[in-house]
Amino acid sequence: TPQEYAAELFDRACQVEVGGDALEAMKLFAAAVRVDPQVRYLRRAASCALAANQPKSAVEYAKKAHSLASHDLSAARLLAAAVISTAGAQSFAEIFGQSAG
């Protein structure tokens, strides 16, 4: 099933990330999220993106995770960390698509 395939991709991504190849792991996490966008997969993809120094990807994954589980404090913390990691590159308004004013 698609969910089983996504779970296999996710497990492989976790192994690759633990092995130290965050960029390769990000590709696998992205594939897992495309097939089955679970909060757990999105959170791990965001964490991996932060580790790979890919803050824009981290923000996108964290925003999706937070939108699916707005009550989940770990998703909120991850979103905050991702936003903070982009502080030099973008303003809060740009990240969240809001006008500043």
Image (cartoon, helix red, strand yellow):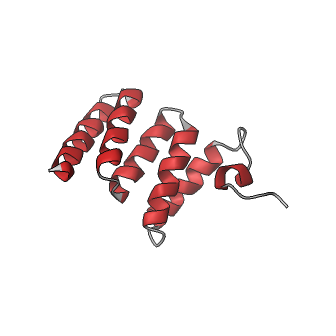
Q: Is residue 21 above or below residue 42?
A: above
Q: Which residue is at a point 34% across and 51% down the rendered structure image?
A: 41
Q: Which residue is at a point 43% across and 67% down the rendered structure image?
A: 69
Looking at the rendered image, the quarter that the C terminus falls into is bottom right
Q: Which residue is at a point 35% across and 54% down the rendered structure image?
A: 37
Is residue 22 toward the left or the right of residue 67 in the image? left
Task: Count every numbered label the image shows and give the total.
Answer: 0
| Extreme-right residue of the structure | 101
Looking at the picture, how far across and down is residue 21, in whole percent? Answer: 36, 26
Is residue 52 toward the left or the right of residue 30 in the image? right
Q: Is residue 34 above or below residue 93?
A: above
Looking at the picture, how far across and down is residue 17, in whole percent? Answer: 33, 34
Viewer-closest of 35 and 70 = 35
Viewer-closest of 97 and 23 = 97
Q: Which residue is at a point 26% across and 43% down the rendered structure image?
A: 10
Is residue 88 toward the left or the right of residue 101 in the image? left
Looking at the picture, how far across and down is residue 65, in whole percent? Answer: 44, 58
Looking at the picture, how far across and down is residue 35, in whole percent? Answer: 29, 47
| Extreme-bottom residue of the structure | 71
Q: Is residue 5 above or below residue 92?
A: above
